[in-house]
Amino acid sequence: MKREELAFYGGLKTVDKEFPWPVFDQAEVDAVARAVQSGAWANPNCDGMVAEFEQEFAGYCGTKHAITCANGSVALRLALLACGVKPGDEVIIPPYTFIATASVVAEANCVPVFADIDPDTYNIDPVAVEKVLTPRTKAIIPVHFAGQACNMDALMQIAARHNLKVIEDAAHAHGGEYKGIKLGSIGDAGCFSFQSSKNLTSGEGGIVTTNDEKLAAMVDSLRNVGRVKGGQWYEHHYLGCNYRITQLQIVLLSQQLKRLEEQTRRRNENGLYLNSLLEKIPGITPLTRGHGETLHTYHIYIFRYDKSFFNRLPKREFAALLAAEGVPSFMGYPEPLYKQPVFQKKNFMCYAIPEHVDYTKVHCPVTEKACYEEAVWILQHAMLGTKEDMEKFAGAIAKIQKAVNF
């Protein structure tokens, strides 16, 4: 096979199919219509339909409380503040994640400290966490990246030894499980996003889950302009803001939640099947399973690419060829978070980042290899396809390999 036969150069696509997202039908349309007709578009009291969904989501995750808010970034920020961090405290995070995991730490006047990731899972490495601990460390934010559960046993043990709070960033992990326990219910708090690409979506929105009554009450107050339960409308106890979700988003989420479990299990099954196909292709290594995850949400399906098996073709070019073949795919993050200009130049509009903190000296080799050389993503909506689709995804990769090595 010659390169000219690849879709990128005008050949036929391997995958000639769309994978629509979000998935919805008349049930969502009717639910939104009823909400519009009711005139209850806002959410001034955080009750009614909002409270019902919060109870339902808490029950789904196995937590006592769930508190909705404007988006997943806000969820992280509210959870962090409710955990009692103070200006100058250090919070350990992975560098292979969306920038919100880091930016909310800086927004809270805390210091983001980067710990490298595990090469087999791309989740934060507990060994690396221990290496960056200091007396100023107050919290860890493990990210269940791509929907694969972090090593929560090890992280919770570290937290217990050092009296740290653990906030699960579960933006990719709706419905995922660690040793049979839903993600977002293991740490002091769990934070989810309902942004448009997420496995459970209303376009925007977020939620904090917790079993801690005081933490829940604080998150509830901070998202509602500092009001407290039983207080007056113009009575403000804490420095909160209006981070409330709307009724229109809630009715969408209520309908979408009915689909989540089946969709999650389908993604998990397709991920396992795709693993079995890709591990047969030289130079392609799926991220490994068997680290405690019992249900993987595959918000992103990630495999490691080795260009030495593809005629030294750079990852960026391989990813472009794969996308042209019709596989909903992407090269992933181009660089670690600490390489972003905001960290390299310390463009922070806050006062608590000490002068000695220098992100230009941070080096996380596993993350850098993932960004620059290895990681290729297939997006979650594609993982709702059929087994035949998974076979075509693998076929597209094999086709590229054959063509570039011709």
Image (spheres, helix red, strand yellow):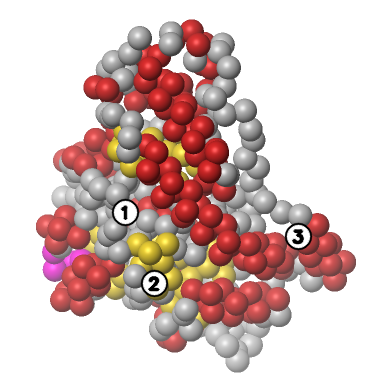
Q: Earlier in the sequence, mark 1 or mark 3?
A: 3
Towards the viewer: 122 or 406: 406
Q: Which residues are magenta?
A: 134-138
Residue contact at pointers 1 and 3, CB within 8 angstroms: no
Residue at horizontal 47%, vertical 78%? 62
Above or below, 279 against 25 in this view is above
Pointer 1 local density, CA inside 10 Å: few below 14, some 14–19, many at least 20: some
Depth check: 403 or 254 in front?
A: 403
Residue ID for mark 3 = 28
Residue 214: horizontal and vertical position, in percent?
42, 85
Q: Is residue 335 visible?
A: no
Q: Amino acid at mark 1?
A: Arg
Toward the bottom, the furthest residue is: 230
- Image quarter of the N terminus: top left
Q: Which mark is residue 289?
A: 1
Q: Quadrant of residue 234?
A: bottom right
Residue 44 point in image, percent of width and height: 69, 75
Q: Secondary structure at mark 2?
A: loop
- Cα–Cα gap, marks 1 and 3: 35 Å
**Nearest to viewer (mark 1 / mark 3):** 1
Find out whether the residues at labels 2 and 1 contact each other: C-beta distance under 8 Å: no
Q: CA distance from mark 2 to mark 3?
A: 30 Å
Q: Is residue 176 visible?
A: yes
Query: Mark 3: few, some, or many residues within 10 Å (few <14, many ≥20)?
Result: some
Which residue in the structure is indicated by mark 2? 180
Residue 140 located left or right of residue 225: left
In the image, residue 114 above or below residue 241: above
For residue 58, the mark is: none
Q: Vertically, is 87 above or below 366?
A: below
